[in-house]
């Protein structure tokens, strides 16, 4: 069973490749290495005993994409992670985001139709819900107008997929991620943002290790118990495992509709200060942080209702916040010790 993982050297992609290989799948990665390193495939090989194959090209290139699928027309399914994901950057450079995230998806869909590859798992995001009226948010919650071009690319991508499968034999599962954090227990792979991290946990671990001076907590005047914003943090390995379940569901013809959507979260909301306290507990380090103003575009509180995924996929996130932080910290320490 051969699976194409686009963006497979990235953060969520690499953890998913490990889980797929450990479940017996053969994996081919396509990645343009715009935000990751080729050496990730060696690290994956050290974990699983099998180095996945990697082809480096840009899926925005129609001809190269078609050529790839022509050579790999025995692929059983595609997990499409490859995309840009920095909210602020998407506001500053929207066309970069629309071109990259949408053209690559369209190229993949066209090639899948040409070579009769029917199964697609798509990386979506809880950002499609915006600020939900009443968390927890289930899959039937209304899609709110996107706060950023990045968020809009996820909404439009889901629509492009739905329209495409009306006229082809394509089946698709969109997985709406909440906030993935943490790293593989081996500490051989993890999140490796280039430059200054946008996301909370990489900023925390880089501050703790001394690469960053101070963490800024964006706002303590939200309508939440401690005033800081609430998110549903999920361990990246729990998230990765859900992709294997989704692929099997498609290949084994257990889908109930040609397009299915599942939330991937724990169902627990934690504030920024909760995350900091948990990190300080598991690392034994005091974190240097300061409260500053809100970050534009941030929602106040969002966490998942994961009951549909729990029931339909038979999947459940198992790791708690302390385990997530401990694994992120172990990865940061291990990675920096090699530098
Ligand atoms: C954002 C996107 C999400 C996207 C994800 C991927 C929104 C609403 N969400 O998640 O769709 O998939 O990025 O990159 O656009 N925080 C601090 N200090 C920091 C960094 C973050 O206080 O230095 C706070 C934020 O204000 C937020 C929480 O930590 O309350 C989590 O932030 P972050 O890790 O950036 O994720 P989201 O913004 O939730």
Image (spheres, rainbow, N blue to C red):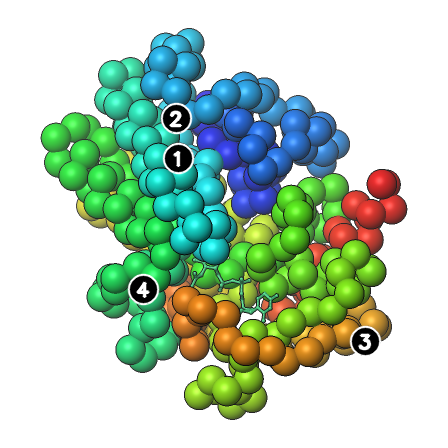
Cα–Cα span, label 3 and label 1: 40 Å
Where does the image place residue 235, in percent across and percent down from the top left? 58, 58
Cα–Cα span, label 4 and label 2: 27 Å
Looking at the image, residue 192 sits to the left or right of residue 147; the answer is right
Whether pointer 2 and pointer 3 mark residues with C-beta atoms closer than 8 Å, the reply is: no
Of all residues shown, which one is farthest toward the front?
A: 92
Cα–Cα span, label 3 and label 4: 34 Å
Count the marks.
4
Cα–Cα span, label 1 and label 4: 22 Å
Q: Could you say whether the residue bearing mark 4 is in a helix, strand or loop?
A: helix
The first of marks 4 and 2 along the sequence is 2
Q: Could you say whether the residue bearing mark 1 is in a helix, strand or loop?
A: helix
Of all residues shown, which one is farthest toward the left?
A: 167
The first of marks 2 and 1 along the sequence is 2
Whether pointer 2 and pointer 1 mark residues with C-beta atoms closer than 8 Å, the reply is: yes
Residue found at x 31% / y 64%: 129
Task: Using the image, tell me which numbered label, if any, was put on residue 129.
Answer: 4
- The CB of the residue at mark 1 lies under 8 Å from ligand 1: no
- The part of the image, by quadrant, that contains residue 56 is top right
Q: Residues within 10 Å of mark 2 (few under 14, many from 20)?
A: some
> Which residue is identified by label 2?
60
Q: Using the image, determine if residue 86 lies above or below residue 316.
A: above
């Amino acid at each position: 069973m051969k699976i194409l993982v686009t963006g497979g050297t990235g953060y969520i992609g690499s953890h998913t490749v490990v889980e797929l290989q450990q479940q017996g799948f053969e994996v081919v990665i396509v990645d343009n290495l715009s935000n990751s390193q080729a050496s990730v495939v060696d690290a994956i090989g050290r974990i699983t005993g099998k180095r996945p194959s990697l082809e480096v090209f840009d899926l925005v290139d129609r001809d190269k994409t078609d050529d790839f699928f022509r050579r790999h027309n025995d692929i059983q399914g595609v997990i499409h992670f490859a995309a840009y994901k920095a909210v602020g950057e998407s506001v500053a450079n929207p066309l970069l985001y629309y071109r990259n995230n949408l053209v690559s998806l369209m190229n993949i869909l066209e090639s899948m139709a040409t070579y009769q590859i029917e199964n697609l798992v798509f990386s979506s995001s809880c950002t499609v819900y915006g600020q939900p009226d009443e968390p927890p948010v289930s899959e039937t919650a209304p899609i709110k107008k996107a706060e950023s071009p990045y968020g809009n690319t996820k909404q439009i991508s889901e629509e492009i997929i739905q329209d495409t499968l009306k006229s082809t034999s394509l089946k698709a599962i969109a997985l709406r991620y909440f906030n993935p954090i943490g790293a593989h227990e081996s500490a051989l792979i993890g999140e490796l943002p280039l430059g200054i991290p946008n996301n909370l946990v990489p900023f925390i671990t880089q501050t703790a290790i001394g690469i960053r001076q101070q963490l800024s907590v964006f706002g303590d005047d939200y309508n939440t118990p401690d005033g800081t914003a609430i998110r549903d943090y999920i361990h990246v390995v729990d998230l990765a495992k859900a992709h294997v379940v989704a692929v099997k569901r498609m290949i084994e013809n257990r889908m109930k509709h040609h397009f299915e959507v599942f939330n991937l979260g724990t169902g627990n909301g934690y504030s920024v200060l909760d995350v900091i306290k948990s990190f300080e507990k598991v690392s034994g380090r005091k974190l240097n942080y300061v409260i500053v103003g809100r970050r534009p575009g941030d929602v106040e509180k969002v966490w998942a209702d994961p009951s549909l995924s729990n029931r339909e996929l038979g999947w459940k996130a198992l790791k708690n916040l302390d385990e997530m932080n401990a694994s992120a910290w172990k990865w940061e320490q291990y990675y920096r010790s090699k530098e």
